[in-house]
Amino acid sequence: MKIIRSVNNLKQILKFFRDNNYIISLVPTMGNIHDGHLELVKKAKLMNTICIVSIFINPTQFDQSCDFNNYPRSIKLDCKKLKSYNVDIVFIPSVLTMYPSGTNNYTCMYVPSLSEILEGSKRLNHYKGVTTIVSKLFNLIQPNLAFFGEKDFQQLVIIKHMVYDMHYNIKIISVPIIRETSGLAYSSRNTLLDKDDYKIAHKFYLTLKSMADKLKHNIHCVVDLIKITTHQLEKIGFIVDSLYVLDYKYLTCITNNSTNIIILSTVWLGKIRLIDNIKVKIFK
Ligand code: PAF
């Protein structure tokens, strides 16, 4: 496994792989590698590709500098885990490499509307930061395939939209959420939960799952179910930041005829913000 930090070295090695007709896949991450990331890597390796994992904690997608500063960093352990999964290249650029003109006045990539709703309405420049960094990685690496988890579902929809609009010749492969046995979705932020909060964190998923089971048989009760589920979550100790039931493909409002929908939610547990979602197929 090669660890590369500079654009020149990256270009050099990519040229070799491209000249030899290898298929190149990219797994973009912000590090603190967990089983969710490793599932993306597994999929990339199963497809016989040269797998590049980028580790870059992207400052422009954080609203608050304290959130950026507190983001867990574990490069040594990350590289160890990635090596054991036969990753070919780990790209670990510096902020200056990714933002040569700095992070205040940077040239950006922005997907309008989709970046402004739901999570985007609360975290003002978050998705602008995400699409900017992902497009920079796409431009530098020009992968054939790029892998994204479904946990941040809005991010996935926005990136697919960017690829479509910008004519990137990159296939986006989405990978379902990987959960701990308790049901808690793997997340880099889980390591920031204190002991007591960690013990109840899985109840976030269990409560959403029970909502999904009810919804699947009766889409008409959605308004009541949102109220009941919010109450249940708050009783457990979560502060509900958002709980939406939307059309799965376009993240628009559901109608009585909707069949493929998604429950999206974010909650606070102590100082940590958790995010999760469940797709629901409605029985008619
Ligand atoms: O999902 C993430 O970890 C980040 O948003 C991404 C896609 C690596 C961009 O920084």
Image (cartoon, grey):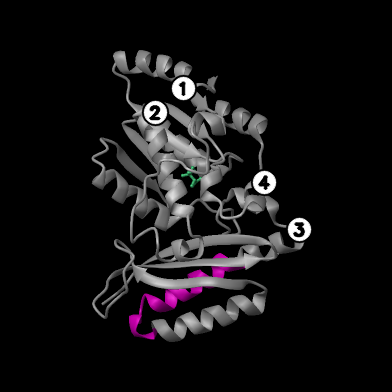
Q: Which of 111/83 is in front?
A: 111
Q: Disc 3 or 4, which lies upstream in sequence?
A: 4
Q: Which mark is residue 7?
A: 1
* Amino acid type at mark 3: Lys
Provide the secondary structure element on which disc 1 rests.
helix
Q: Quadrant of residue 92?
A: top right
* Amino acid type at mark 4: Asn
Q: Which residue is mark 3?
A: 195
Name the residue at the right extreme. 195
Within 8 Å: ligand 1 and the Cβ of disc 3? no
Q: Are marks 1 and 2 in contact (CB under 8 Å)?
A: yes
- Count residues near mark 2 (Cα–Cα under 10 Å), then give few for <14, some for 14-19, many for 20+: some
Q: Real-space Cα distance between discs 1 and 2?
A: 8 Å
Q: Which mark is residue 58?
A: none
Magenta stretch?
Answer: 203-221
Q: Was residue 214 drawn as part of the magenta stretch in this picture?
A: yes
Residue 282 x/y as whole percent:
31, 73
* Amino acid type at mark 2: Leu
Q: Main secondary structure of the magenta part?
A: helix
